[in-house]
Amino acid sequence: MERVPTSPGERPEETGASLESAYTASATINEQGIVTEWSEGATRLLGYVPSEVVGLPAAHRLADVLSEAARRLPDEQERWSGTVVLRHRDGHRMEVALLAHRWTSSGGTTKWFVVSAVGGAPRAPWEEPLKEWAFTQSPCFLAIFDTDLRLVRANAGMERTLSLTEAEMRGLRLPEIAPDPVSDETERRMRLALDSGEPQYMEAFVHPTGVGGEHGWATSLAPLRDPDGRVHAVCLAAHDRSAVESVQHQMLLTDEVDTAPIGTTLDSVRTAHELADAAVPRFADFAVVDLLEPLPRGDEPSSVQADVPVTVCRAAARSVLDGTPESGVAVGDTTSYPPLSPPVEALVAGRGAVYGAEDPAFARWAAQDPEAAWIGEYGAHSIMVVPMRAGGGTLGVAVFSRHRRREPFQQEDLRVAGELTARAAAGIRNAYRSGREHTTTMTLQRSLLPHSLPDQAALEIASRYLPAAGEAGVGGDWFDVIPLSGARVALVVGDVVGHGIRATATMGRLRTAVRTLADVDLGPDELLTHLDDLVIHLSADESDQDSGGEETAGGIGTTCLYVVYDPVIRRCTVARAGHPPPAVVSPEGSVYLLDVPAGPPLGLGGLPFETLEVELPEGSILALYTDGLLQARDHDIDEALDSMFAALVRPADTLDAVCDRVLTAMLTHRPDDDVALLVARTRGLHADQVVVWDLPSDPSVVATARRQTTDQLTTWGLEEAAFVTELLVSELVTNAIRYGQPPIQLRLIHEKNSTLICEVSDASSTAPHMRRARTFDEGGRGLLLVAQLAQRWGTRHAEIGKTIWAEQSLTGF
């Protein structure tokens, strides 16, 4: 429920002047006459508790006049007042004065806010003193002159202004009190007010020195009448508008500096110049910004000492004079402030100060520091020195001076300068930290991304990675190439939300998770599902630790594309989580995007991921990329895709040339977001590299499998690998017959000059596990032997059954 402001009168005020404190009874009634709110004061007045009134027509409990007033008042009427008769809860009627305000909420609902002041009748003994206090203590200068224009009364303000007491002025005319042409004109205007009965106005007042205040004053002369309308005196009221104008000037100045562009870039020099530009000529004639040399690291405290010179680097200087002649130090050069000088004292104390020409520290600095010769040379009479502090550390000092303006700096100017300097210090600190964080992030990112691509036979691969050049910092884009069992290869491209160290660290965690899940040989859709769960857990953990983080916790919204290519059957299996689909260039030269179902970004949970299986002829090109590649162009997405397609389809000798051509076509400048590009050309394992045998579930077939394996290795010229391979085949086939289910299949894959793969498949989903056999056990050593003989081995599951595989390196043969 939207509520109107509660009247302060609803809180009973303590007083001893009456038996009951004054309070306010209030209620809210909608346009249909229904009571929607009921205050404690209303309960005190009429006896009804809110539950007996709220939600009912006002006429039902209170009086017809309330609901009728709420319904019948014209729309343009915003207020109503009058006296009505209300019914108390005990049945008696009460005459109550009401004031009602029409109030319309931001949603357009109109209500009436009805209030009534109860108790606390005016205190008669105080009426006359209040009137007297109002006259004597008024902030205006007040005086009363009779029909002879002789002073009758004067308040304290008038006494201070004219340096005379009321007794000393009583009975005298204004020209006699302060002889001056302004007094003569004021008296003439008072006579007009008496004779015409109309108020008179002047833009002047008198000073005690007899010099008229020609500017900055407002004087009103009003006739004073009795109840019958006869004029008996004239009241003079005057106030100094210069004070008001000064406040208005400071307010305008504050508004200007609040909107001054400071810290618009992560460039400390630019920020220093923005501070100087904001100060000159708004409130200073000359300003310099000096940063400590060297800048403190991190948030460590400043080592400035009051009795030691302080070395600074001049970061910015600005003057109302052309060429900034006051600054004897060029921007970018270093200088030193002498001990006990105002800048050093400000750095040590950690607070700003204002100095005038009469201050000893001001004169001492001008005398002992040759770099401060501008103070006397250009007649600087007022100086502000403000330390630049941010994050608990001191970065430098800003000096502001006036030599053209006659007014000295005031405390309000020091406050404004402090706000400006604090903003600049925060910007410089952020720029400094951003530079260090950018270097740290780049180092971390380089350590997490693959340094080299793995050697495998399924794909020819090239990649490029361009970190962001914008102020947002390095992002969390990544790519990876993961060899899988069966000569297959997985390609991964991902994009973590956000920038900086946090995004890069999240990228590293997700890349590690993808590699772990890929080693289990999960399908692309299942792998993304597990990755989605991981992001949800990371988000929950980081939200508990840092609920106010600026970046998305745990990588929610991260996108990922996962591709598995099998060179034996030349098929790709693809799934994506909110990521752009890959582009394909066929050997004939056609280019298109794979129509992969668009899964949700990671971290949303509860939504499925779907896969696309597609056959790719040998020699096809796959291009995986992050969205920074498309967003870097100044055109729409269709034009960006057209440019990428045109670059991909052009013939090139190498994939590295393809990558360079794509980046040249897509990027006219360093991107504002990271760009990852992974380009792969498919290869196929020909029929002479793969052999498959279907085996019956009979122990006698083990010997047949060993013989067939030996014959095939002889055909491939791998006789030296026959002994080890026979042992592997014997153990794997025996396990499949003993523990698996038919059909059983043996497959040998020969990746030329690199790897020999032995795979045995059966229809059972039960995965074997290696155990430690005891001395007298007859079995249990098969997988232990496989693990010792093979370079890698493992199990992958299919929709039906499993495959146990073992790889041997042919490098030593």
Image (tube, rainbow, N blue to C red):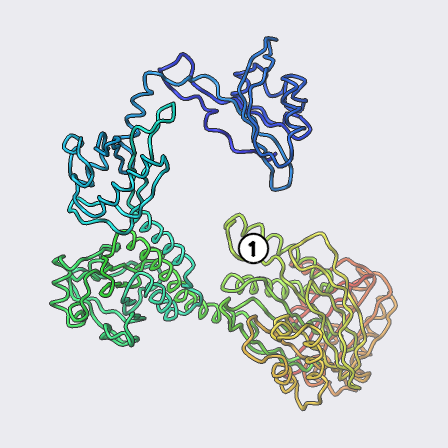
- Taking the image as shown, residue 122 lies to the left or right of residue 588, namely left
Residue 427 is at least partly visible in this image = yes
Is 610 in front, or is 781?
A: 610
**Residue 728 rendering spot, x and y as whole percentages:** 73, 72
- Residue at (39% x, 70% y) in the render: 270
Is 731 in front, or is 356?
A: 356
Please name the amino acid that badge 1 sits on: Ala
- Taking the image as shown, residue 254 lies to the left or right of residue 782, namely left
| Vertical side of 488 occupied by 813: above or below | below
Bin the neighbour count of mark 1 within 10 Å (Cα to Cα): few under 14, some 14-19, many 20 and up.
many
**Residue 711 rendering spot, x and y as whole percentages:** 80, 83
- Residue lying farthest to the bottom in this orientation: 653
Give the residue number, with chain letter if any, for mark 1: 553
Location of the N terminus by quadrant is top right
- Residue lying farthest to the front in this orientation: 195
**Residue 751 rendering spot, x and y as whole percentages:** 72, 81
| Vertical side of 409 occupied by 95: above or below | above
The image quarter in which residue 794 lies: bottom right
> Which structural element holds mark 1?
helix
